């Protein structure tokens, strides 16, 4: 019988193929305001923006990297237009990771759906004193939200194919996931938001 010969070679990390996941991130800031939404009829709670040619889509390597998004800042001028104490900012076309879910009210049975929220913006309140000086009234003020993003922040995963399609849809929803109805907000509730998109090569 022919003898089977074998040999053992020690592991050498220099001979291994590896991918460096610690590449330097690239940031893109996109500031939009509800007044310039292309969505008709106009609705501050469901806005659509044209962001074509914003990202360098001629770079195929950017399609294979890791994209994340943050809400860096937001101003809601007429925050009195919103009921409740929090406005949920969602990017339904971009953020639908299979790792993020939210439980919604659905009659007798709750529904579990993918969570497209990227931030929860608390509505500002101020305490006012009535002319009689004996009654305190909570009145909403213009809301200013700001987040300082660091390299250690995780962010929300972005569908890069949808991002490079050239459209950015922004929805403002209630904390329970329900959309704001006409009766829930005024006719004019303008807002301005800055989204920070982070690309990190694989």
Image (cartoon, grey):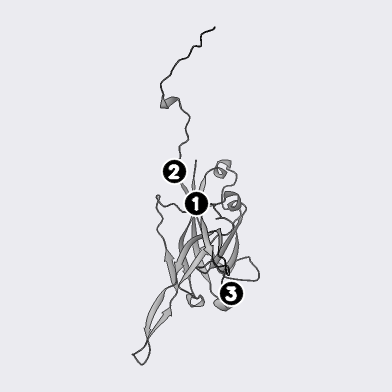
Please give the label number shown on residue 68.
1
Q: Residue at x 40, y 81 (%)?
A: 138
Task: Please say if 77 is above or below 115.
Answer: below
How far is mark 2 from mark 3, CA to CA? 43 Å
Label total for image = 3
* Residue 23: image location, x then y, percent: 45, 41
Task: Please say if 16 is above or below 58.
Answer: above
Q: Element at badge 1?
A: strand
* Residue 67: image location, x then y, percent: 51, 49
Of callouts 1 and 3, the N-terminal one: 1
Please give the label number shown on residue 197.
none
* Residue 114: image location, x then y, percent: 55, 57
Q: Element at badge 2?
A: loop
Please give the label number shown on residue 181.
3
- Per the image, the residue denoted by label 2 is 24
Task: Please say if 44 is above or below 9.
Answer: below
How far is mark 1 from mark 3, CA to CA? 30 Å
How far is mark 2 from mark 1, CA to CA? 14 Å
Toward which corner of the image does residue 40 lie, by quadrant? bottom right
Q: Residue at x 41, y 60 (%)?
A: 147
Q: Residue at x 65, y 71 (%)?
A: 41
């Amino acid at each position: 019988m022919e003898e089977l010969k074998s040999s053992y070679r020690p592991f050498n990390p220099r001979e291994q193929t590896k991918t460096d996941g610690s590449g330097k991130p690239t940031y893109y800031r996109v500031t939009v305001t509800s007044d310039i939404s292309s969505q008709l009829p106009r609705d501050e709670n469901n806005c659509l923006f044209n962001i074509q040619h914003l990202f360098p889509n001629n770079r195929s390597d950017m399609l294979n990297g890791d994209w994340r998004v943050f809400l860096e800042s937001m101003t809601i001028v007429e925050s009195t237009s919103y009921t409740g104490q929090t406005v949920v900012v969602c990017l339904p076309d971009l953020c639908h990771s299979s790792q993020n879910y939210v439980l919604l009210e659905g009659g007798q049975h709750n529904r579990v759906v993918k969570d497209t929220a990227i931030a929860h913006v608390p509505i500002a309140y101020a305490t006012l004193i009535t002319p009689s000086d004996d009654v305190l009234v909570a009145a909403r003020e213009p809301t200013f939200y700001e987040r300082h993003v660091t390299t250690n922040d995780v962010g929300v995963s972005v569908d890069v194919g949808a991002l490079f399609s050239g459209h950015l849809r922004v929805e403002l929803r209630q904390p329970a996931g329900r959309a704001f109805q006409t009766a829930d907000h005024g006719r004019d509730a303008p807002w301005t938001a800055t989204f920070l998109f982070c690309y990190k090569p694989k």
